[in-house]
Image: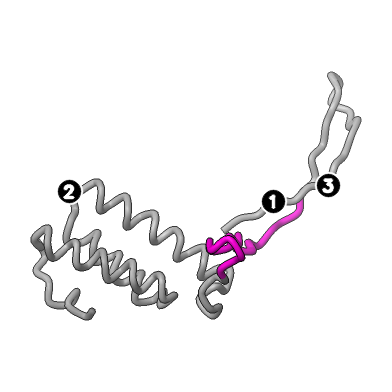
């Protein structure tokens, strides 16, 4: 799996596919540091391949969300009675804010407290 170090800057399609497979495997095993390193390497060796770039960017976003939610320390998602993996949305940090509504004269007519998640 550590062949990513040996790849030349301009790798063949076969080399890139092997790297993508290893990156996906590392992500499935929740080895996020390795998965991130492999996906970044995919970006480095295939700068003009939009399919690989798209896959790598989406994977790095998933890894970032998993990292923020602390998912890298959790076992793989459980399988429910239908045989499908249960979908668990990561817990994202949130912040609170106030929404103010004003009238024509700029006077406050309503205040609401709200919150939103971010990553």
State yes or no: residue 15 in magenta: no
Q: Quadrant of residue 103?
A: top right
Question: Which region is colored magenta?
Answer: 79-97
Front-most of 83 and 4? 83
**Image position of 23 (left or right of 107):** left
Q: Secondary structure at mark 1?
A: strand
User: Residue 104 at x, y = what percent?
Assistant: 84, 19
Q: Which residue is identified by label 2?
A: 48
Q: Secondary structure at mark 2?
A: loop
Q: CA distance from mark 2 to mark 3?
A: 46 Å
**Image position of 116 (left or right of 38):** right
Q: Residue furthest top?
A: 104
Q: Which residue is identified by label 3?
A: 113
User: Residue 67 at x, y = what percent?
Assistant: 51, 70
Residue located at (58% from left, 68% from top): 69
User: Residue 33 at x, y = what percent?
Assistant: 39, 76
Q: Tags 2 and 3 in contact by the CB under 8 Å rule?
A: no
User: Residue 117 at x, y = what percent?
Assistant: 65, 54
Residue located at (27% from left, 71% from top): 22
Quadrant where the image shows the C terminus = bottom right
Q: Which residue is identified by label 1?
A: 116
């Amino acid at each position: 799996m550590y062949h990513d170090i040996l790849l030349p800057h301009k790798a063949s399609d076969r080399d890139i596919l092997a790297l993508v497979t290893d990156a996906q495997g590392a992500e499935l095993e929740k080895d996020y540091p390795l998965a991130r390193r492999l996906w970044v390497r995919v970006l480095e060796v295939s700068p003009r391949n939009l399919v690989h770039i798209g896959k790598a960017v989406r994977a790095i976003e998933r890894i970032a969300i998993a990292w923020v939610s602390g998912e890298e320390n959790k076992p793989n998602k459980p399988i429910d009675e239908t045989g499908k993996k249960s979908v668990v949305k990561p817990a994202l940090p949130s912040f609170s804010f106030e929404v103010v509504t004003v009238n024509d004269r700029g006077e406050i007519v309503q205040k609401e407290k709200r919150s939103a998640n971010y990553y």
